[in-house]
Amino acid sequence: MFPQIQWYGSYFTYILFSLPALLLGLWAQAKVKSAFAKYSKVQNYTGLTGAQVARRMLDSNGLQNVQVEQVSGMLSDFYDPLSKTLRLSSGVYDTPSIAAAGIAAHESGHAIQDSEHYFPLQIRSAIVPAVQLGSWLGPIIFMVGLVLSTQIGEKIAIAGLVLFGITAVFAIITLPVELDASRRAKATLESSGFIGMEQMVGINSVLDAAALTYVAAAAQAISTLLYDVFLLMRRNRD
């Protein structure tokens, strides 16, 4: 039998830490789906598809070397800094909608960040391998250390906590990266004539909803980290 595990925490304590971030995440996802569903049905006045908006935005910033490709999935759009490739989902790539223009411009913003060596993006890219490791291995190491009553167990738990903490750092760093990409997208779409100016309401709705998902992700990572710290402190008291 393990030593007393009352320090593991009650369901109420877990809910206290996790519920606000969880509700924020659900709300953010609902807003994204609602905004995308609404504005993916509204054609932008210029008739440019997401791929065409991305290509023009990239070219206007001297990024003719960045390729624009189509990928499967819904809202699976991303910029790959290693291959210098902008990958747009089918609902964005060949669709001349307001939503497609906003998302394509946002992802193009990441390519511009990369070309300008935008510092937060560089940091985020550098810690990706550590995040991939820490996100799954950190909790395992933490729980192993938590059930051990020795000082070694405490050190193991702290090591797991630090590993998982990298995930929270990644989520926090992601915020300025994503917000800056959206800022660049809005500025370009407002000044370039790629869409009608009166359609910026739809662009703002889509990109602001997307930004909220990153806020929620950071809140969830931080709340989980704080809960783990609480468990460790309670273990030491007991």
Image (cartoon, rainbow, N blue to C red):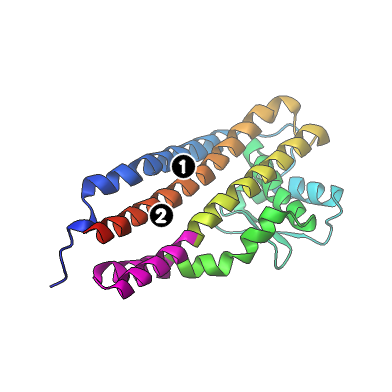
Question: Which contiguous range is marked in magenta?
Answer: 136-165
The answer to whether 45 appears left or right of 231 in the picture is right
Q: Earlier in the sequence, mark 1 or mark 2?
A: 1
- For label 1, the SS is helix
- Check residue 81 in the rendering and tell me which mark sits there, or answer none: none
Q: Which residue is mark 1?
A: 29
Which of 29 and 146 lies nearest the eye of the viewer? Answer: 146
- The rendered magenta stretch, by its main secondary structure, is classed as helix
Residue 224 on image: x %, y %: 38, 53
Q: Identify whether 212 is placed above or below 77.
A: above
Q: Circle 1: is it few (<14), some (14-19), or many (20+) Cα within 10 Å?
A: some
**Residue at image location 74% in from the left, 57% down from the top:** 114
Residue 130 on image: x %, y %: 54, 68
Residue 12 on image: x %, y %: 23, 45
The quarter of the rendered structure image containing the C terminus is: bottom left
Q: Work out whether residue 20 can be spotted.
A: yes
Residue 183 on image: x %, y %: 70, 39
- Asked whether disc 1 touches disc 2, contact meaning CB atoms under 8 Å apart, the reply is no
